[in-house]
Amino acid sequence: MQDKIEGVEIKKLRVIPDERGWLMEILRSDDTFFAKFGQVYLSAVYPGVVKGWHYHKVQQDNLCVVKGMAKLVLYDSRETSSTTGKIMELFIGEKNPVLVSIPTGVLHGMKGVGTEPALFVNVPSEPYDYDKPDEYRVDPHSDEVPYDWSREDG
């Protein structure tokens, strides 16, 4: 088991099936890590493509892959954190239905794995501000983050 990054919460999601289909709750206002509602959006990452790195100074992200599979990688660059410099690598999606709550200041990126696009839902704590985005980016292939996005065969 790899190290956990301070403030990151992972909620195992429960799928409730019946003869009509199924239901999966993703985020509830009574979850212990729920901050507040900003907006909900759906995004896709294509197989083999990296979306990241980015972080927020105000916003908390709550990510869940609802179709396909993705590698979600978190990097703690917060100077005041007890886990500064730690990397978390998670494989999330249909085969591992979880919600990952990402605190402010933690860099994160996602790579589509498998043969189809991975669709993810994010419920950030803040609405997107088009005039002043709370979005700070780092090149995913630079040396600023000690992580290699290459696939590991073996």
Image (cartoon, rainbow, N blue to C red):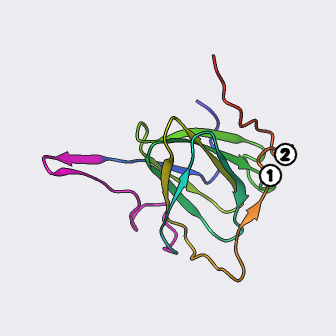
Q: Residue at x 38, y 48 (%)?
A: 13
Secondary structure found at label 1: loop
Residue 77 in the image, given as x and y percentages of width and height: 78, 52
Which label number is shown at residue 139? 1
- What's the residue type where badge 2 is placed? Ser
Q: Is residue 30 above or below residue 120?
A: below
Query: Which residue in the protein does label 2 denote?
Result: 142
Q: CA distance from mark 2 to mark 1?
A: 5 Å
Closer to us: 43 or 56: 43
Q: Residue at x 67, y 63 (%)?
A: 104
Secondary structure found at label 2: loop
Closer to us: 4 or 40: 40
Closer to us: 61 or 109: 109
Residue 69 in the image, given as x and y percentages of width and height: 49, 40
Based on the picture, tell me whether residue 2 belongs to the magenta stretch: no
Q: Is residue 2 above or below residue 19?
A: above
Residue 1 in the image, given as x and y percentages of width and height: 58, 29
Report whether 120 appears left or right of 105. left
Closer to us: 148 or 50: 50
- What's the residue type where badge 1 is placed? Asp
Based on the picture, tell me whether residue 16 belongs to the magenta stretch: yes
> Furthest residue to the left?
19
- Residue density around tag 1, few if under 14, some if 14–19, many if 20 or more, within 10 Å: few
Q: Which residues are magenta?
A: 15-37
Q: Which SS does the magenta portion mostly show?
A: loop
Q: Are marks 2 and 1 in contact (CB under 8 Å)?
A: yes
Report whether 79 appears left or right of 102. right
Residue 8 in the image, given as x and y percentages of width and height: 59, 51
